[in-house]
Image (tube, helix red, strand yellow):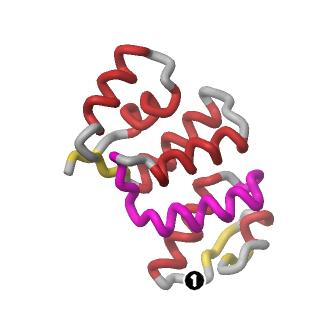
């Protein structure tokens, strides 16, 4: 299965360049895999560069989870991270993804200096 990079995923979601969006659509039509790193980078770009709101980021993540052609790395982890992000969007999706990845790997608690992240079950503030 084809894997996609951050640029492809951003084009699929942002739709700001018609020719690149078309190329991205064609590339993933027969199935494509999205790594956690690509997903985290894409969400960061949509947040910082495209100034998407948490509500818009949540909608984009929901769309990716049900996309007919995309396979997200450990979709269960992404879904759990999205649930955390939906409950506390100020944390940022990447923090939620780091926590849920550690949880699935069985490496808790997650040590953090982030006060807000430390409030989540499974995280511990240093």
Given the current orientation, which residue lies at the most extreme front position?
68
Q: Position of residue 97 (x, y in %)?
A: 56, 62
Q: Secondary structure at mark 1?
A: loop
Q: Nearer the viewer, residue 72 or 95?
A: 72
Q: Nearer the viewer, residue 117 or 5?
A: 5
Give above or below for 75 relative to 15.
below
Other residues around mark 1 within 10 Å, as few (<14) / some (14–19) / many (≥20): some
Question: In which image quadrant can residue 45 be found?
Answer: top right
Q: Quadrant of the C terminus?
A: bottom right
Is 42 within the magenta? no
Q: Position of residue 87 (x, y in %)?
A: 76, 61
Question: In which image quadrant can residue 27 be found?
Answer: top left
Q: Position of residue 55 (x, y in %)?
A: 72, 43
Relative side of 119 to 23, left or right: right
Q: Position of residue 118 (x, y in %)?
A: 74, 71
**Which residue occupies 71% across, 43% down?**
54
Q: Which residue is mark 1?
A: 108
**Which residue occupies 74% across, 53% down?**
89
What is the magenta segment's predominant secondary structure? helix
**Which residue occupies 68% across, 64% down?**
84
Give above or below for 98 relative to 59.
below
In this rendering, the count of numbered labels is 1
Stretch in magenta: 69-91
Relative side of 34 to 87, left or right: left
């Amino acid at each position: 299965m084809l894997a996609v990079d951050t640029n492809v995923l951003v084009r699929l979601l942002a739709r700001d360049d018609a020719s690149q969006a078309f190329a991205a659509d064609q590339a993933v039509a027969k199935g494509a895999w999205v790594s956690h790193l690509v997903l985290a980078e894409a969400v960061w770009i949509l947040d910082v560069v495209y100034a998407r709101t948490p509500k818009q980021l949540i909608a984009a993540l929901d769309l990716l989870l049900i996309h007919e052609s995309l396979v997200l790395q450990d979709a269960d982890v992404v879904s759990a991270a999205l649930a955390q992000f939906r409950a506390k969007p100020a944390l940022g999706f990447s923090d939620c993804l780091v926590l849920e990845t550690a949880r699935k790997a069985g490496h808790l608690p997650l040590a953090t200096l982030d006060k807000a992240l430390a409030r989540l079950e499974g995280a511990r503030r240093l």
